[in-house]
Amino acid sequence: GENVEQHPSTLSVQEGDSAVIKCTYSDSASNYFPWYKQELGKRPQLIIDIRSNVGEKKDQRIAVTLNKTAKHFSLHITETQPEDSAVYFCAASSGYSTLTFGKGTMLLVSP
Amino acid sequence: NAGVTQTPKFRVLKTGQSMTLLCAQDMNHEYMYWYRQDPGMGLRLIHYSVGEGTTAKGEVPDGYNVSRLKKQNFLLGLESAAPSQTSVYFCASRTGYEQYFGPGTRLTVT
């Protein structure tokens, strides 16, 4: 089955800096790669996703890049703000099958 | 729309007791999922359903059973709770690619 590795497990940045979280996956058939944000005590919420037919997708301060050859994808957050502090999860799936999640990255943005 | 709801929000069980967690969605989604979330482990899939009357095992199904008698409801049962089942349980439903999560149930087994 699919295996998703996520790094780093914790990331501390200063407000205004950029943050990058990286994930690798094992199943070459995977074609859908979402990123979820989970604030303390809350449910995971989708913040951005990418499908295998594109290499990059942006939404304001958030971007995701995908390298299918190397089987890795990354989340980029620019101009970080304290409200970006949360746990971020990457995931991968092939078609309409199940999602396999990474173990998460705790992002702390200090004012 | 209420989206995805879960009942109860919190529960404390003694070892060996049984209970059922209820997930309900009002979005007419075919696919529903049960995950458990433990510190440092991410979200791990317990069971899932691709439609009314169907269920399938996920990554960590042992000790759990599920039923999907109605399209809008997905039940997760613990027949004989163990301390290792202390966790936060999330239900999700899906349309297209995106999964929508419920608010979670925090379960403690003593």
Image (cartoon, rainbow, N blue to C red):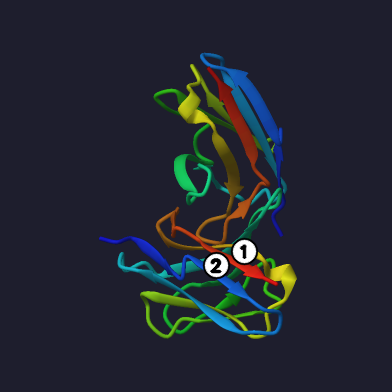
Amino acid marked by disc 1: Leu
Residue with the most extreme left position: B1
Residue A54 in view (yes/no):
yes
The residue drawn where x is 36% and y is 74% is B72
* Mark 1 secondary-structure assignment: strand
Q: In 3D space, how far apart are the residues under numbered discs 1 and 2 (Cα atoms)?
A: 6 Å
Q: Which one is in front, A91 or A111?
A: A111
Report the side of A83 relative to A27 (left or right): left
The residue drawn where x is 71% and y is 48% is B40
Residue B22 screen position, x and y as percent: 45, 75
* Mark 2 secondary-structure assignment: strand
Q: Are marks 1 and 2 in contact (CB under 8 Å)?
A: yes
Disc number placed over residue B34 in the picture, else none: 2
Quarter residue A100 falls in: bottom right
Report the side of B72 relative to B57 (left or right): left
Quarter of the picture containing the N terminus of chain B is bottom left
Q: Which residue has dot 1 on it?
A: B45
Residue B100 screen position, x and y as percent: 42, 56
* Callout 2: chain: B
